[in-house]
Structures are given as structure tokens and as C-alpha cells.
Amino acid sequence: MSTEPLAISLSRGHRLWWYGPESYAKVLTGLAEAIMTELAELERVDWGELEAEAMDQVVGITQIRLLNELYYCLGQLRSHGILLEVKQAIQDLRDIWNRLMEATGRPELLKFHEEPNPNPLQ
């Protein structure tokens, strides 16, 4: 593998860099911060005045964007021979996102909650 920085592009053109020992954390944090910037555009709306259905849509769209961007990044990394565990990456991104939501005082409903396993292995 090359020691040159590897550019990882998000779907809307934002670039993240895979370089050095903290690459994994930097890419996941950069991804979460990029989505949080997009979320800031939506936050111009008064959360208190949104109906429950509209709030659910914002939350759903935000979580879908997080996952889509993660899969997009993982695909780019894979094409360069960097294989990461998808389930672990989702959990790590969820943790990073939730810390960002807490640190910036965002509403609790924007946190990325772990889905319960409907069919646990016995």
C-alpha cells in the first residue's frame, strides 16, 4: 500500500484523507462533521414548530445520509485494498455522531440509535 495520502470523496464532493495511523477515526469524524454541516441547513427551521412526522423525516434522512456516505467511503477504500468491517464501522460512526450531537447540543432525537436485533442467534 502506498504511503501517499488517499483522497476519499463524499458523494457531494467533500474530500477526506486516509493517511497515517489515525486515518480510520479521521475519516469517520470527517464524514460525521460533513453531514452535521448539512444538518445545520435544516436547523434553520424551529424544531419546536415541526410536526412529529416532519421531525421523523429529518431524522430518517440524516441517518440515511450517514449510512450512504459511510458505504460510499468504504467502497472507495476497498477499491484501494483497504478492507474494513462494515458492522464495526457503523457502530463507530454511530458513536462519533452521537458524541457530536451531545457536544453541539442537538436534540436527542438526532442521535443515531442502535437497532435492536429482531432475530438474535440462539
Image (tube, rainbow, N blue to C red):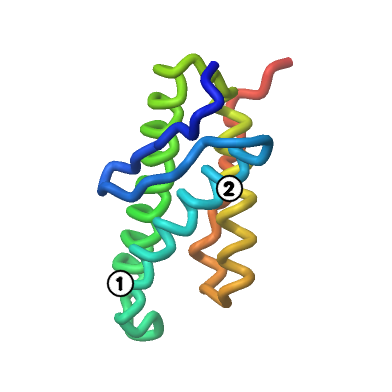
> Taking 17 as reference, is 9 left or right?
left
> Taking 28 as reference, is 21 left or right?
right
Residue lying at the far left of the rendered structure:
12
> Taking 99 as reference, is 3 left or right?
left
Give x and y (percent) for residue 28. Answer: 54, 44
Report which quarter residue 23 is drawn in: top right
Q: Quadrant of the N terminus?
A: top right
Give x and y (percent) for residue 110. Answer: 49, 63
Report which quarter residue 111 is drawn in: bottom right
Q: Quadrant of the C terminus?
A: top right
Report which quarter residue 77 is drawn in: top left
Q: Which residue is mark 1?
A: 41
Which residue is depicted at the point 56% across and 36% down? 19
Q: Label 2 amino acid?
A: Arg
Q: Is residue 60 above or below residue 56?
A: above
Give x and y (percent) for residue 58. Answer: 34, 62
Of the numbered discs 1 and 2, the one sitting upstream in the chain is: 1
Q: Nearer the viewer, residue 37 or 82?
A: 82
Which residue is depicted at the point 39% across and 65% down? 37
Q: Secondary structure at mark 1?
A: helix
Which residue is depicted at the point 33% across and 53% down? 61
Q: Which residue is mark 2?
A: 94
Which residue is depicted at the point 60% across and 58% down? 98
Q: Nearer the viewer, residue 72 or 87?
A: 72
Give x and y (percent) for residue 57. Answer: 32, 59
Residue lying at the far right of the rendered structure:
122
Q: Secondary structure at mark 2?
A: helix
